[in-house]
Amino acid sequence: MLKFTLSRSGNLFRLSDCKIFQRTAPKQDWMDDVEHETERLDRIEGRLDDREDEVRDIVRKRGRALAMNIVKLIDPVFTPRKLNPDDAKVLFHPVDFIVFRGMKNGAPNRILLLDKSSPSKERLALQ
């Protein structure tokens, strides 16, 4: 007969696990079933954790690609030219934007002047 008791920590343990005077292996009981099921669930959880990281990376890449497509629709000035909008300052006259390329990352390495094409001869002469 198998007996269960509480340890000082309050956890269940089997007296048959002590193997003090026992010559034969104890019969499988409900606690063995619980332990096997816990181990099985731990293995499944580990596989799911590994898969979760892969899925998050895939979804992150898809989200970035989708966001870039939406930004291209909204931003016809900077995105097609692969410029960071944070590097740009608005002037509007005599040019629309001045872009200090690389300013957001530290020190600018190039200065660009951006303006929409203007049919005005005066504006072209001023630029």
Image: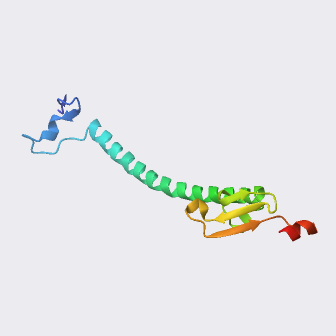
Q: Which color scheme did the rendering employ for the protein?
A: rainbow
Residue 67 to residue 23: above or below: below
From the image, which quarter does the N terminus lie in?
Answer: top left
On the question of residue 67 being in view, the answer is yes
Q: Quadrant of residue 73?
A: bottom right
Q: Quadrant of residue 28?
A: top left
On the question of residue 78 being in view, the answer is no
Q: Position of residue 60 (x, y in %)?
A: 58, 56
Residue at the image position 87 percent from the left and 69 percent from the top: 124
Residue at the image position 33 percent from the left and 47 percent from the top: 39
Q: Quadrant of residue 122?
A: bottom right
From the image, which quarter does the C terminus lie in?
Answer: bottom right
Q: Position of residue 121 (x, y in %)?
A: 93, 69
Q: Position of residue 116 (x, y in %)?
A: 83, 64
Q: Position of residue 64 (x, y in %)?
A: 63, 58
Q: How many marks?
A: 0
126 displayed left or right of 103: right
Out of 89 and 27, give the one closest to the viewer. Answer: 89
Residue 1 to residue 63: above or below: above
Residue at the image position 60 percent from the left and 70 percent from the top: 109
Out of 77 and 118, give the one closest to the viewer. Answer: 118
Out of 71 and 16, give the one closest to the viewer. Answer: 71
1 displayed left or right of 20: right
Out of 43 and 60, give the one closest to the viewer. Answer: 60
Residue at the image position 64 percent from the left and 70 percent from the top: 110
The residue most toward the front is: 126
21 displayed left or right of 40: left
Residue 7 to residue 33: above or below: above
